[in-house]
Image: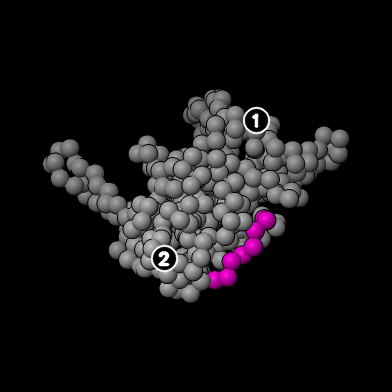
Amino acid sequence: MEKRIMTIFTRTPLHVGAGNSVGAVDAPVMRERHTRIPIIPGTSLKGVLADLWLSDVETCEEDGRTKTRRKASSELLWLFGSDDANAASAGALLIGEARVLAFPVRSAKGGFAWVTCPLALARYKRDAAGAEFAIPEAPTESECLAGPTVQFATEKKVILEEYCFAVKGEAPKDVTTALGKLSDDAVWQAVGERLVIVSDELFTYFVEHACEVVTRVRIDDATGTVAQGALFNQEQVPSETLFYAVIAGQAQKGKDVATRKDAAAALGALDAKLKQEAKGVLQLGGDETTGLGWCSVAMQEVK
């Protein structure tokens, strides 16, 4: 089995919903239960990626009615599997959930900063199979490691949201260099200047409480007032958030050894499709027609 890292850099806010809530936010985003870090489930990623192969349509008879559906190419069935009752099969691609690696937070200096933490970096280094940087020592809750753009140089302080941190030192060069290679997005190239490494506790606080919450409403044309049940609060992961997901490939199963394709071929086919069909941009999550979920995506080699 081989694997690569897919990086997802949000160009617009992203909403992958967790369903209804009884709290103040009616439509929260999906999160890990134990860390509260926002995620994009592997099922969501798989569906969006599979759609890149569904360009042709065909007509079929179903329950006595003629329906139009998308054609499934042989490459699509190989990579993503088939749920056909007569020919069910698993796909060659294994797609994991995407986790936040760097999260944008308002900064009193420089406009905004990307925050990360030792836990997030350690998880990425594990999943990337030995990324070439050292995990920094965890700062205390009142300290941070920071790039020059977001720190007040004379006072050696960084102010993020309502929190003031003493700058313990610069964000390590090996960390910023490694992260800078994860996306070609022009905005992300400033990560070395804007990265702030905080404690694990503060990172989980920011990713839980610094997401956008917007009020959604639909007006009834007949009355000119809010339609019944159409006023709600929706949580969104902000633009300029960096996610990463592990994408693995497995050898094609089947009796005919001569026609099997290996794991590297599966990952190569996905990489080529992202570059040729998607042009490095995917829409993920809900509300596509109102501009949410547009992301820069890239595949990274794993040593």
Q: Main secondary structure of the magenta part?
A: loop
- The answer to if 122 sits in the magenta stretch is no
Which contiguous range is marked in magenta? 131-138
Name which residue lies at 48% across and 47% down: 190
Left or right, 33 with respect to 13, comes to right
For label 2, count other residues whose C-alpha is less than 10 Å away and answer few (under 14), some (14-19) or many (20+). some
Q: What element carries label 2?
A: loop
Image coordinates for residue 92, horizontal then vertical, percent: 71, 44
What is the three-letter code of the residue carrying label 2? Lys
Q: Is residue 284 visible?
A: no
Q: How many marks?
A: 2
Residue receiving disc 2? 156
Q: Which quarter of the figure has residue 264?
A: top right
Name which residue lies at 55% across and 44% down: 183
Residue receiving disc 1? 73
Q: Can residue 166 be seen in this view?
A: yes
Image coordinates for residue 26, horizontal then vertical, percent: 32, 58
Name which residue lies at 59% across and 46% down: 181
